Image (tube, helix red, strand yellow):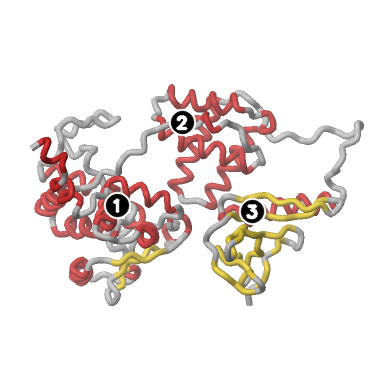
Amino acid sequence: MARKHRYANRVKILKYVKAGQTWRFANTVEKNGKLVRDHVLISGLDEHHPEGTYYIEWHEIGNRRRRKAVADFADVLDVARRKAIEVAAMRADIVETRVSPASTAPVRLGVDTAIDKYLEFIKNHRSPRTYLTYRYTLNTLFRQSCATRSVEDISRDDILKFMTYCYTQGLGHRTVYDKLVVVLQMFKRYDRIKLIQSSDWPNYVEKIRVIYEPEEIQAMLCHANEDEAIFLKFMVGSGFRDREAQHVTWRDVDFHNSVVRVTTKPIWRFKPKNWEERSVPLPTGLIQQLQAFKERRNGMPAQLVFPNSKGKPDTETDMIVKRVAERAKLNCGQCVTKHGNKCSEGPHCQHYFLHKFRHTFATEHLRHGVDIRTLQIWMGHRDIKSTMVYLKGVQSKDVLEKINAGALAGYVA
């Protein structure tokens, strides 16, 4: 039975949702001891509300009610737990609400300690790839740029110095933007917010997502071996991210309903991005080819569909498309990687990479009439804005006909 979620009977977890025509705070729902994501109680009924923001609510001494927004669902329980400990301590007079002149100054949290604690949290609650990204941002970049010793003393100048240091390391504006998000998320965890002004954020060009042209895909398939071809077809047909494809098992492929699922794989410490499993429909022709591929491989339900030679997730899948592109003579001949590898001499062309199949999947579905909300679910995007970026590259099937029929076409004929 669903019930209100309250942490240790001291801190409530709420969600600010739209009920009817108005926005209101609603109690969250707990089932079997776990907080149910996006479920709240409205007039005593359990309702699903994916919109809105989570909050924690508590009462300070004097019965003064306080609320605090929590941006990430994954952080809600941890934030509530820490606040519950703090409230309990205050009520037990372990923490003084008023500091007398004779009292000792509160212990200040060091920046180095804050980074270590935050990275420990990320290591245990996020994917290994996310942890490595955060570790580089905080351990390498921020520690090098920050001279301030305590979290309480961090200022706008410290954040601006961090951004400047990133630029001196050769990072671009979009990358610096992403690094800045990581740093500010960390300080928000320690209740340090509004450290910069809106004008301080790096400006960058939101590029159109490049896709593979039909002739490029056909050329690669013609020069791929049987295993490479089915893998490339799967990537363009599913729109999976690299790691999602690396961890798909035969149990995830539903041959009867022509869908493939992204599911958690604890054995390989794989969790879907945004912590949500999902299903994606596949073309019937691809399902039939996967069925034949499974029979040829004698695939068992728990086995990976595209493993490495040891039966484990293949972390080098991006090289498959690069090798096939080189064999198909698609390399541009001008690319040079940061390690000095030239695409004129090997499979190093930067125009051919695995994630580009995901861009192709999204753009082609929008082009052929799939509505953006459905595509958002297939792509596994939490925010619709992430899906909307693909609209820039969409050209409807009749737009060229309209252009050729217009007056401008006559001027340039």
In-front residue for pair 169/73: 73
Quadrant of res 290: bottom left
Residue farthest left in this picture: 413
Quadrant of res 4: bottom right
In-front residue for pair 46/327: 46
Camera-side mark, 2 or 1: 2
Characterize the local packing of mark 3: few (<14), some (14-19) or many (20 or more) Cα atoms within 10 angstroms: few
Residue type at tag 3: Asp
> Of label 2 and label 3, which has the lower sequence position?
3
The residue pinned by badge 3 equals 78
CB-based contact (under 8 Å), mark 2 and mark 1: no
Describe the element under mark 2 as helix, strand or loop: loop
The residue pinned by badge 2 equals 202
Question: Could you say where residue 350 lies in the image, as x and y percent from the top left?
Answer: 24, 38
Describe the element under mark 3 as helix, strand or loop: helix
Residue type at tag 1: Arg
Q: Quadrant of the N terminus?
A: bottom right
Q: Quadrant of the C terminus?
A: top left
From the viewer's perspective, is 292 left or right of 247? left
Camera-side mark, 1 or 3: 1
Question: Could you say where residue 152 lies in the image, as x and y percent from the top left?
Answer: 69, 32
Residue type at tag 2: Pro
> Of label 1 and label 3, which has the lower sequence position?
3
Question: Could you say where residue 124 lies in the image, as x and y percent from the top left?
Answer: 54, 51
Residue 317 appears in the picture as rendered: no
Q: CA distance from mark 2 to mark 3?
A: 31 Å
Q: CA distance from mark 2 to mark 1?
A: 26 Å
Characterize the local packing of mark 1: few (<14), some (14-19) or many (20 or more) Cα atoms within 10 angstroms: many
Question: Could you say where residue 404 lies in the image, as x and y percent from the top left?
Answer: 13, 46
> Of label 2 and label 1, which has the lower sequence position?
2
Q: CA distance from mark 1 to mark 3?
A: 34 Å
The residue pinned by badge 1 equals 358
